[in-house]
Image (cartoon, rainbow, N blue to C red):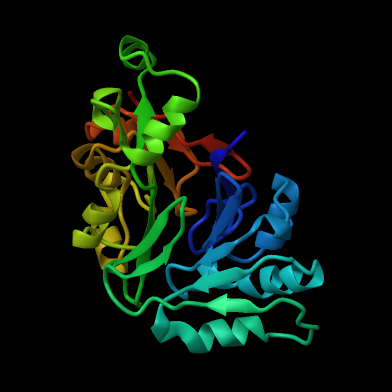
Amino acid sequence: MSVRELVVLGTASQVPTRHRNHNGYVLRWDGEGILFDPGEGTQRQMLRAGVAAHDLNRICVTHFHGDHSLGLAGVIQRINLDRVPHPVTAHYPASGKRFFDRLRYATAYRETVDLGQEPVSGDGAVLARTPAYVLEARRLSHPVESYGYRLTEPDGRRMLPERLAAAGIAGPDVGRLQREGALGAVTLDDVSEVRRGQRFAFVMDTRLCEGVEALAEGCDMLVIESTFLDEDESLAVEHGHLTAGQAARVAAAAGVRHLVLTHFSQRYDDPAVFERQARAAGFTGGLTVARDLLRVPVPKRER
């Protein structure tokens, strides 16, 4: 049975707290695992969350501030220690290659895995096309070069049993119709409908910008930073971050089905305030204020 869920490894921003580790998120998408922004302590958080190095197929880094990347050294060494048998590909801003290389070779270890690298070098870049998804990146607005990531599943077809029955099509003929597009006078459009592919976006440190809106558009799940509360919006703009209300308004305008707020400043100690401000901003969909080691399922498809 396929699994699509977000595994939250850490939710703090620049400074971790007693209850929040630095950033780290794993998207489980059917048989693949994508690790986003492995901050310090990610390897241990993976252990606590039941995520193994063998579960990872890609590593996506939004930018090279420490709370989003210092865990790379440990994760990469663990991938090699465990001799992960399948390809693992790292995506990160091309301008930060020197930081990636320093972290990859921070200490001595034996390389057993060929870690692929496909750096992000432009806004709207398509990083990967697989049968299960297209992975792309959009430029964000932060003091250092930063990109958000969006995963889009190709649209498919949903067969409609009542129309198949009315057309007298059953058994092997259903598969033949799907392959060939028509069976006699009956076309695939007559007995099926488009099954919209699911969409996931990951947006970290940024001010409001076009990239945020493009990444969020029509998402089934949006994971987005909300470092500050609305009363500290001036600080958010100054430091290149979002508030809970700003993130929620983006999600509402984009038609997001489930919003996950994360990357919280250590100055706040009541997570419920982030939810209240998001609701006050007009977001009415599914809402999660992330906490470490939480698992959040991607919403089931809508008919």
Asked where in the image residue 235 lies, by quadrant, the reply is bottom left
Q: Find residue 29 and report its horizontal and vertical position in percent.
A: 53, 46
Quick one: quadrant of the N terminus?
top right
Residue 30: give x, y in percent of width and height.
56, 44
Q: Is residue 88 above or below residue 155?
A: below
> Where the C terminus falls, by quadrant?
top left
Name the residue: 62% across, 72% down.
72
288 vs 21, left or right, is left
In this rendering, does residue 270 appear at all? yes
Residue displayed at 29% across by 66% down: 140
Which image quadrant is residue 43 in? bottom right
User: Residue 142 at what x, y percent from top left?
Assistant: 31, 70
Q: Which residue is pictured at 47% across the width and 50% down the height?
A: 132
Q: Of residues 215 and 63, which is closer to you in this image?
A: 215
Report the front residue among 48 and 126: 126
Give residue 276's position: percent from left, percent from top: 34, 31
Q: Is residue 197 above or below residue 170?
A: below
The residue drawn where x is 32% and y is 67% is 239
With respect to residue 171, does 103 lie above or below? below
Query: Residue 199 lies in what quarter of the image?
Result: top left
199 or 13, which is in the foreground? 199
